[in-house]
Amino acid sequence: MRESLHERELLLWTAAHLVKPYQLLIPFYTHNRRRPWTLETGMLLYDALSRGKSTPRHRRLSRREAIAAYPGIEHRGLTGGIVYVDAYACFAERLAVEQALDVRAAGSSVLTHTAATELCPGASLIEVALRDELTGNTTTVRARSVVNASGPWVDSVLGSVQGWRGHRLIRAVKGSHLVLATYPDAPSTGIHFEAMTDGRPVLVLPQSDGTILVGSTELVDEADPGALSCSDAEIAYLLTEANRLLPSAHFTQGDVLHAFAGARPLPYAASAERPADISRDHHVVSHPTVPGLFSLTGGKLTTHRALGEMAINRVVDHLALQPRRRSRPQGPRRHAALRRASCSPTRTMPLPGARVADWHAFAAQCEQVSTMPAAVRDRLLAVYGVRALSVYDAMRDRPGLPALIRATNDVTTAEVWVAVKEEFARTLVDVVARRLMLARTADAGLGAATAVAAVCAELLGWDARQTEQELVAYRSWSARLRPNCQSASDVSHNHH
Ligand SMILES: Cc1cc2nc3c(=O)[nH]c(=O)nc-3n(C[C@H](O)[C@H](O)[C@H](O)COP(=O)(O)OP(=O)(O)OC[C@H]3O[C@@H](n4cnc5c(N)ncnc54)[C@H](O)[C@@H]3O)c2cc1C
């Protein structure tokens, strides 16, 4: 927890445009399995482990104060609560995109849609066969060290190592979230409460676009992690719990705008029977039969940087023990040079979108001087941070492009240009879902997909057939989100 809290504090600065402080209430109910004093002790520990943090410490609320601040929550059995401040990354994929931009800027290659299909360990090098999943082209790279960071697919990548004899490393635990339409009495901050069904923690998270995120579930699921979808039973569980907490919401299936599911790549332990028993720690695992190969297990989005640093340090240690080459520094000098990598600059280096002396001053200044419509300006700042300026340049330099994507009131065509030309996007799903972040909006990006596809077609040279194939692929990808487009088109209105 100390590491998580430390990394969270770093992210509030190094990714200030993407990671924001977020207030939550923990309500105390007489039916809770955890007693108020247990939660309060937990919170004292939480504050003690994050001493010196930029966000305020927790605050205790009486029953009266809790009802005054959150009038829409269930009053029966409520005895009080705690308000605390966590952090929220609305666009997790954008964190990954910005890391990739830095990786390229540091001189490395970024190959998207490229699968490692076979690993052949040699005397000092590991040969990795790669296949471009869009073109079918294959190629081979040789490396003294390989890091298998494929999350829930770690074991399947290890299965492709020639002569592999190792044990299982990952237990994939499925989790789902619902995106619900808002309603008049909706809470103004997040609420972290205990599910009555099974005592698990569940979160209700109001979002800036007026939708409400509710999640998550926890189920051991051995299905293909890339094909997971929120089940009817998970929807029913989350709606029941949200309605118990927020009785005036009367959420029904019809209010679920869409739902998404993912797999947590937790460390495998044969003895852990329930998902809650599985360790949430992360590890860099070496493989004695394949020197130079490392696999990552566990880990959270919050601690991705720390786990990356741990992995790189293991690689550096491995390389330091490798046979010397004449052109490189020798002995202790070499080890010292390599060791310097252990003080990773990522501890203090802002991501490209936050690379400015004072992000908050920059954002405030943009609000004052920008002549763009407020919705466009706010979106550009929230998604791109200071890189909003390069989107703005793309807009200015291409006056032929229509300014806004049809069916949206804030998404600029220039963003598609930036996604394709600067941010490695190759498919419509890449652009809509993982760069423009429209899969997170009420209609799961379906409304904007056709207009985005037309711009992509121009930039990527798609003919009419390929453009249609990309649209079909988007519809089929987004079907896993179970979009409810009828209510999605009316998200800003009262859902009843
Ligand atoms: C419901 C849910 C809630 C969560 N909540 C939180 C939270 O509140 N806070 C938090 O910090 N974390 C949270 N997490 C955890 C976090 O999302 C994951 O731990 C994190 O995404 C794992 O990152 P990863 O890079 O290891 O795996 P992934 O993000 O799954 O990435 C693995 C990548 O490997 C690629 N790959 C697979 N096979 C191959 C191959 N053969 N060759 C090349 N590439 C391959 C895949 O395409 C994929 O892009 C949550 C997760 C879930 C599911």
Image (cartoon, rainbow, N blue to C red):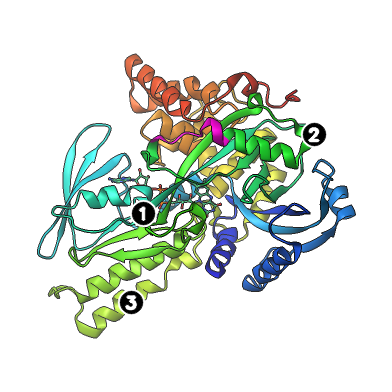
Badge 1 amino acid:
Ile
Q: Which of marks 3 and 1 is nearer the N terminus?
A: 1
The residue lying at 52 percent from left, 60 percent from top is 350
Residue at 67% of width from left, 44% of height from top?
A: 204
Q: What residue type is labelled 2?
A: Ser
Secondary structure found at label 2: helix
In the rendered structure, the answer to whether residue 63 lies left or right of residue 261 reads right
Q: Position of residue 310 (x, y in %)?
A: 38, 68
**Mark closer to the chain start, 3 or 2:** 2
Looking at the rendered image, the quarter that the N terminus falls into is bottom right
Q: What stretch is highlighted in magenta?
A: 227-234
Q: Are marks 3 and 1 in contact (CB under 8 Å)?
A: no
Q: Which residue is drawn at 68% across and 46% down?
A: 196
Name the residue carrying label 2. 248
The answer as to whether callout 2 falls within 8 Å of ligand 1 is no
The residue beneath circle 1 is: 170
Q: Quadrant of residue 121?
A: bottom left
Q: What element carries label 1?
A: strand
In space, the residues marked 1 and 2 are separated at their CA atoms by 41 Å
Farthest residue in the bottom direction? 332
User: How dense is the environment of label 3, judged by Cα within 10 Å: few (below 14), some, or many (20 and up)?
Assistant: some
Q: Which is more foreground, mark 3 or mark 1?
A: 1
User: Is 313 rendered above or below residue 374?
Assistant: below
Q: Which of 193 and 83 lies nearest the eye of the viewer? A: 193
Judged left or right of residue 131, residue 285 is right
3D distance between C-alphas at marks 3 and 1: 30 Å
Is mark 1 in CB contact (under 8 Å) with mark 2? no
Whole-percent x, y for residue 34 in the image = 69, 59
